[in-house]
Amino acid sequence: MARIESRKVQKVGPSTLSVSIPRHWADEMGLKRGSVLFLTSEQDGSLRLFPSKPSDSVERTEEYICNSDLCDEPRMLERIVVGSYILGRDVFSIISSERVSSEHAEEIRGIMRKLIGLGIVEETPDRITLQCSIDPRKYSLDMLLRRLSTISLTIVKEATQALIESDISLAEDAISREDEADMMYLLAMRLLISAQRRREVAEEIGLEDPLHILYFGLMLRYLELIADYAEEIARQVAELLRRYRDRLPGWVVERIGQLNDLAYDLVLKSVDCFFIGDVKIANSILEMQKFIESERDKLMQKLPEIPHLRLILWNITRIADNGKGIAFIAINSALERKTKICSTRPIPE
């Protein structure tokens, strides 16, 4: 736990103020008389000290090791690899006392397809070493967020378009896109963790305020869930077309398409509101979500007894719910800035 110590400001010369630094910290950093320190001022009024320029510092690379013999539950090793990737670990080895099983090796290769920049650099019977070549400072978090938004909304659109056009191949295309959404989400989460740990990384990827790390984390999660729900719609549509294509009334397909279009527009506008900071539009989106739920309830009462239809409607409203969450974030983010609706002024003493 960090220690809080007090220091008095001393006057040195006619116009210079100074403060001493803790001896234990100076010893840990290898500082001595004549050493140069670098300072940065933070938004909360604090100062940060560095014994060398942050850009000149060299991070120590550590190898993280996972004992695969203890990963004896389904997909446990896969989830450990994903977690290590998100946590920013560059070198990660999976070892075994005898031999890495073929099932574990297959798990590792399967999940690597979703982890951008991750590759196998060494493989022996009892060890597989993975290394990530991603430099987080080469990416813009805004760009990754918009890319994830585009992919997720494409799945939303294609899933019900497949129903309208009675096209199973289009539903299968929508299902296959979900892997790309996962790739963007996991890469962006890795960047967020790096930004949380290293302030210079946060600034280089466009996160000037630590609060934005929270906002972006929530936005990414909402968009990833939207992709998941849209993928599930596509799966339900594909099965519906295979088994009940001839029993589908045209009016049901039309109403489902209209409801999905509303959910699509809601998500699209909520993401735009996050970037432009429009409180009025974001507020109207929240009202739109209520309308979507009301229309869903009305349609539920009229649906014929055909499997999959109710699940499709349920997933459409889940997409709208997550769009609503993005709209709330857009409002909170906008309120940090001075707008025509809200501003600040000093309180008279």
Image: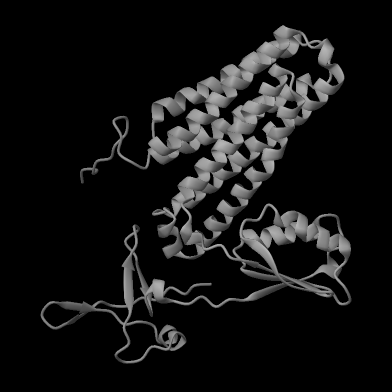
- Please state which of residues 186 and 7 is positioned toward the viewer in this rendering: 186
Q: Position of residue 238 (x, y in %)?
A: 78, 26
- Residue found at x 83% / y 15%: 306
Residue 115's place in the image compared with 22, above or below, is above
Q: Quadrant of residue 26?
A: bottom left
Residue 118's place in the image compared with 291, above or below, is below
Residue 91's place in the image compared with 212, above or below, is below
Q: How many marks?
A: 0
Q: Position of residue 261 (x, y in %)?
A: 59, 20
Q: Is residue 315 left or right of residue 197?
A: right
Q: Quadrant of residue 30?
A: bottom left
Q: Position of residue 67 (x, y in %)?
A: 80, 71
- Please state which of residues 310 and 238 is positioned toward the viewer in this rendering: 238
Q: Is residue 261 left or right of residue 277?
A: right
Q: Is residue 135 left or right of residue 164?
A: left
- Residue found at x 24% / y 43%: 347
- Please state which of residues 251 and 222 is positioned toward the viewer in this rendering: 251
The structure's colour scheme is one colour
Residue that protrudes farthest toward the bottom in the picture: 33
Q: Quadrant of residue 263?
A: top right
Q: Position of residue 54 (x, y in %)?
A: 40, 72
- Residue found at x 86% / y 58%: 73
Q: Is residue 301 left or right of residue 341?
A: right
Residue 146's place in the image compared with 110, above or below, is above
- Residue found at x 39% / y 35%: 277
